[in-house]
Amino acid sequence: LFCELYEEEKRTTIFVTHDIDEAITLADKIYVINGDNVLYEVELDTPRENRSIASFPEVRKSLYEVLSTLSLDYSPLLK
């Protein structure tokens, strides 16, 4: 539904998720924010329709590493 709405409206959207794979699948840019600090930022240049999680192992690993520094358990997100 989100992707359909985006394709119809073509508006800039901020989508908050706690799922690494969802972020990689849906985002053009990913930011990890803690309070007022941007801890990680990456731009995904591959068009969403040609994108797969397997195409971005380095981004997935980096996101997990950054999230791991926040003293929360994000291991279930990296199945």
Image (spheres, helix red, strand yellow):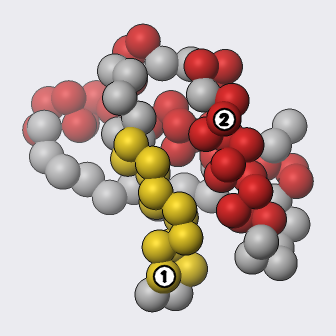
N-terminal of the two: label 2 or label 1? 1
The spot of residue 3 in percent (x, y) is 33, 32
Give the image location of residue 27, x and y in percent: 41, 41
Taking the image as shown, residue 43 lies to the left or right of residue 56, namely left
Residue located 61% across and 39% down the image: 59
Pick out the residue farthest to the bottom: 36
State the image coordinates of residue 66 (x, y, percent, origin top left). Answer: 69, 62
Which element is circle 1 on? strand
Q: Which amino acid, by three-letter code, is at mark 1? A: Asn
Look at mark 2 in the image and give the residue it sits on.
Answer: 58
- Amino acid bearing label 2: Glu
Q: Is residue 78 left or right of residue 46?
A: right
Residue 1 in sight: no
Q: Residue, x 60% and y 28% (percent of image)? A: 56
Q: Quadrant of the N terminus?
A: top left
Can you give x and y, in whole percent of width and height, for residue 58 in the image?
Answer: 66, 35
Q: Which mark is residue 37?
A: 1
Image-quadrant location for residue 15? bottom left
Category of crowding for the residue at label 1, using alpha-carbon neighbours closer than 10 angstroms: few (below 14), some (14–19), many (at least 20): few
Most foreground residue, 76 or 67: 67
Viewer-proximal residue, 52 or 65?
A: 65
Residue 68 horizontal side relative to residue 21, left or right: right
Q: Residue at x 86, y 37 (%)?
A: 79
Q: Is residue 19 visible?
A: yes
Q: Secondary structure at mark 2?
A: helix
Against 41, is 35 above or below? below
